[in-house]
Image: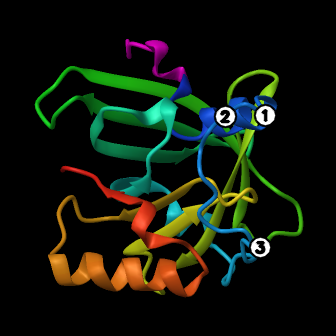
Amino acid sequence: MKKIAPIALIMLSGLALAACNPLEKQPVGNVSVPQPRKPVELNRYLGKWYEQGRYEASFQKGCEKVTADYAAKPDGSIAVVNSCRQSDPAGPLRTAEATARVVDGSGGAKLKVTFFWPFQGDYWILDRASDYSWSIVGEPSGKYLWILTRDETISRRHYAALVSRARALGYDTDLLRRTQQ
């Protein structure tokens, strides 16, 4: 059985909590978040993603070797399992499980993620590769950003190209933190 630790706040669950907490000091990295650029075929998006970079957030502090696994559920929703190693890539494993649902009319590019009811977080697939080898994920406030790839490790050149894409979406890429994989 997977251990669900206080990491229930890891990644997207923190979005819902931060939205409820006006005292959150998370800097806004994009004051004009764009709508997702491309529709998403969910069956192609499912599977394992590796976080390459993110805006640092309190609910993800100290996380390295971050992954997100998405799987279809019989009711049409998506099972989400986020994992990270605490403090370094060999640190203790933390996981959090959630359920995501596609937002109607979003072309599959917007999801609502629930780690614990009734709190939901927005998950917007703002841009992605045509072969689903990478994606750039954010949410409407512009406070959170993730760069994800299918490959566990990528070259500095590939990372720089993805950072450039995030910059083109209006994000302050100086706020990005590279994830150790």
Estimate the x, y position of residue 32 in percent, counting from the top left: 75, 73
Q: Which residues are magenta?
A: 1-8
Q: Read off the residue under disc 1.
A: 22
Q: Are marks 2 and 1 in contact (CB under 8 Å)?
A: yes
User: Is 5 in the magenta?
Assistant: yes
**Numbered disc in front, either 3 or 2:** 2
| Vertical position of residue 127 compared to residue 177: above or below | below
**Numbered disc in front, either 3 or 1:** 1
User: Is 147 in the magenta?
Assistant: no
Q: Quadrant of residue 147?
A: bottom left
User: Quarter holding the N terminus?
Assistant: top left
**Dot 3 crowding, Cα within 10 Å, few <14, some 14–19, many 20+:** some
Q: Residue at x 43, y 12 (%)?
A: 5
* Tag 1 secondary structure: loop
- Mark 2 to mark 1 CA distance (whole Å): 5 Å
Q: Are marks 3 and 2 in contact (CB under 8 Å)?
A: no
Q: Read off the residue under disc 2.
A: 24
**For residue 157, side relative to residue 125 (left or right):** left
| Badge 2 amino acid | Glu
Of pointers 3 and 2, the one earlier in the residue sequence: 2
Instruction: In this rendered view, identify the residue nearer to me: 98 or 127.
Output: 127
Instruction: In this rendered view, identify the residue nearer to me: 157 or 5.
Output: 157
Q: Are marks 3 and 1 in contact (CB under 8 Å)?
A: no
| Badge 1 amino acid | Pro
**For residue 126, side relative to residue 179 (left or right):** right
* Tag 2 secondary structure: loop
Q: Residue at x 72, y 71 (%)?
A: 33
Estimate the x, y position of residue 40 in percent, counting from the top left: 64, 73
